[in-house]
Image (spheres, rainbow, N blue to C red):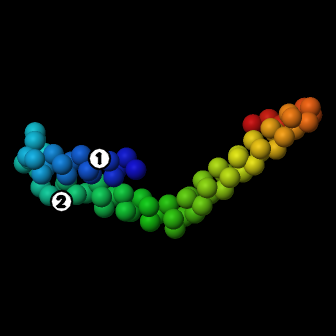
Amino acid sequence: MYLLGLGIVLLLMKYVEYGPVAGWSWWIVLAPFGLAAAWWAWADFSGYTKRKAMEKMDQKKRDRVDKQREKLGLKTNRRR
């Protein structure tokens, strides 16, 4: 996401010809977009995205179970 933000900022700076970016090559200005696409492709291919989604879902499940245990007056002995 940071690469996408950087690409947008550089693109706007190049378009309005602001600062040193005005003299840079378009390849340099557009490079963050290519790097962002490469990152997303790697994250999907390696399973990084799916793993992070599963971790988030598991954490929500643990929080929900702990909340219900607290409502029932049971102690939670889980360590995180």
Q: Amino acid at mark 1?
A: Leu
Observer-nearest of 44 and 62: 62
Determine the image quadrant of residue 54: bottom right
- Residue at the image point whose x is 60% and y is 53% from the top: 52
Residue 53 in sight here: yes
Is residue 26 depicted above or below 67 in this figure? below
Q: Which residue is mark 1?
A: 6
Q: Amino acid at mark 2?
A: Trp
Observer-nearest of 55 and 43: 55
Name of the residue lying farthest toward the front = 71
Along the polypeptide, which appears first: circle 2 or circle 1? 1
Q: Which residue is mark 2?
A: 27
Observer-nearest of 19 and 35: 19
The C terminus sits in image quarter: top right
Q: Residue 6: x and y, percent? A: 29, 47
- SS type, badge 1: helix
* Left or right of 67 in this view: 42: left
Q: Residue 15: x and y, percent? A: 12, 51
Q: Residue 43: x and y, percent? A: 50, 60
Residue 41 numbered mark, or none? none
- Residue at the image point whose x is 52% and y is 67% from the top: 45
Residue 77 in sight here: no
- SS type, badge 2: helix
Q: Residue 60: x and y, percent? A: 70, 47
Name of the residue lying farthest toward the bottom = 45
Q: How busy is the neighbourhood of tag 1: few (under 14 within 10 Å), some, or many (20 plus)?
A: some
* Left or right of 77 in this view: 8: left
